[in-house]
Image (cartoon, rainbow, N blue to C red):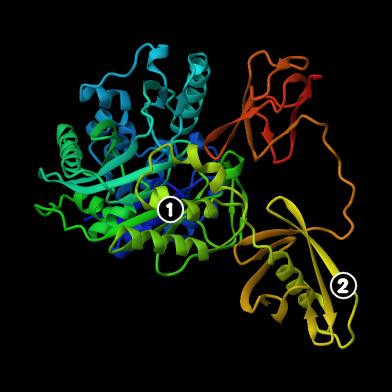
Amino acid sequence: MITSVLVANRGEIACRVVRTCRELGIRTVAVHSDADANALHTRVADTAVRLPGSAPADTYLRGDLIVKAALAAGADAVHPGYGFLSENAGFARAVQDAGLMWIGPPPEAIEAMASKTRAKELLGIEPLREVTEADLPVLVKAAAGGGGRGMRVVRHLADLDAELAAARAEAASAFGDGEVFVEPYLEGGRHVEVQVLADTHGTVWALGTRDCSLQRRHQKVIEEAPAPGLPAALDDEVRALAVRAARAVGYAGAGTVEFLVAGDRAHFLEMNTRLQVEHPVTEAVFGVDLVAGQIRVAEGHALAEDPPPARGHAVEARLYAEDPARDWAPQTGRLHRLAVPDAVRLDTGYADGDDIGVHYDPMLAKVVAHAPTRAEAIRKLAAALDRAVIHGPVTNRDLLVRSLRHPEFTAARMDTGFYDRHLPGLTEPAPDPHAPLAAALADAHGRSRFGGWRNVPSQPQTKRYLMAGEEHEARYRHGGQGLEADGVRVAHADAHLVILDVDGVERRFEVSRYGDRVYVNTTALTALPRFPDPTAQHAPGSLLAPMPGTVVRVADGLTAGTPVKAGEPLLWLEAMKMQHKITAPVTGTLSELHAVPGQQVEPGMLLAVVKESAP
């Protein structure tokens, strides 16, 4: 019997594993980098061991350090979570060689399937060796790891070499393995996968299907189970192929077999020899705990002959600290508050007051809804996200709500190109026009020594806010009956709650402040000073860092005086395990270049300047 488990991961999945271990009466050990010294997963575990450094390559990818940590903490088993070393056969063997129990598939199975190139060869599928115009578009893909890192769609042959180089660099940084390969990219396909759970006695469960078609940067955003609208024959085919793949490598534990479905055909993509981020939707539909299943399989227990029956439908949304309107730029800063209605499941690696840093994936949480039907599950999840309290960096919450309510999604007509088609409409700002007034009234009440009320009417007061990138002015007065505003009746106002009567309908506005940042219900505002100080202006064509990160590459031969074209990649930043291209804003000449490889940059830092050519 397992009595103590070291979780060789961080964040949300580490917290998830700890939760199940506690329910089973198993002691837990966390590992953490210096950047994660006070992270939630270190606080919820029974004990924690430091891995010196902050970069993944120095910490969570150091299998030798993790094994030493397990032995030092007295653990008798290791759970790898997902990502990092979860699909590393060498790490699995090192765990076993140290006398520890490995909560995962046999190293041989990991070896056979963890490399996507070897997995395809095992099933008789060859990657593209030479790419021609006739093969386009193609997908450049990392052979190891997942999560969309090291993946690039190439539509023009001239871009292939640059995208191969970028994918290799990103894969090496994320997984410690820069091997990439090329395969055909199927437009308009759906991403469908099958969850398997296998024991060491020959039983393999195929726990239904999942649809994970809504993706950005080849990372899943919204997932659901079962995959809607699959023909019965195709559903049977993919589940049978998943079982066959698991049996072919002597699989044990939880794993996922992924397909691209186009029309009535299913194309094998890969087998992930680990737990997936989206596993909660399968847990909800089948009423199982997959982490508990992994532990029991590792202990040698046999599964029942048949899996439990499926019930209802589940949908999961990944809440990211990112700005979808700005090329999905990751965001950092203090997460002041995160709360969702109790009707849904929240899996997160953060708590109120935690800081979101630059070193790791920007996912804040997974929000999961389960209901008897797909339509009910979608409605429940959209409503929960709409009402969620999220105070901190910019997130993709509005995008998620709009995606869930989009007619293409509700009708189950989505595919992996969903965001390519609909992103502009889904990210169009739609701030509440009464939010600035509510913020100003709450501020006025909070600051007034008379509690916000005066007996003598006064001149109109004004306060300015930045909302959705635009400046807004709120005007109000201290009247004889209290605070007044044009066009609405102020039914109530205090420092935290404002009620406005708008055309006979009372609307409630909950107001929270963190410095100059103000949240009115779900709308974020920035209070502007009454008399703004002069600020330094950047020259036209200035390229500013959109996020904190590291300059990992500058375009070959790029120096001051180099002619550039609008949209041409000039340099690459790495932040939160993803690389982001910085392109020329106009056609002209590079007049200044301040960025150098390896440089740490902060948001707003000047990287380069492009002087536009005369028309």
Farthest-out residue, front: 503
Which percent across, then down, holds residue 296?
A: 21, 53
Q: Secondary structure at mark 1?
A: strand
Q: Quadrant of the C terminus?
A: top right
Q: Mark 1, mark 2: which one is toward the viewer? A: 2
Residue 177 vs residue 523, the one in the foreground? 523
- Residue at 86% of width from left, 41% of height from top? 536
Above or below, 457 against 593 in this view is below
Above or below, 550 against 100 in this view is above
Q: Residue 510, located in which quarter of the rendered image?
A: bottom right
Q: Secondary structure at mark 2?
A: loop
- Would you say 156 lies left or right of 550 here? left
The label on residue 606 is none
Q: Label 2 sits on what residue type? A: Pro
Q: Residue 445, located in which quarter of the rendered image?
A: bottom right
- Residue at 40% of width from left, 11% of height from top? 132
The label on residue 460 is 2
Which percent across, then down, holds residue 202?
A: 10, 43
Query: Residue tagged by mark 1?
Result: 317
Which percent across, then down, holds residue 23?
A: 30, 65
- Would you say 66 lies left or right of 114 here? right
Q: CA distance from mark 1 to mark 2?
A: 44 Å
- Would you say 212 lies left or right of 394 here? left
- The number of callouts visible is 2
Residue 290 seen in the figure? yes
Above or below, 526 against 34 in this view is below
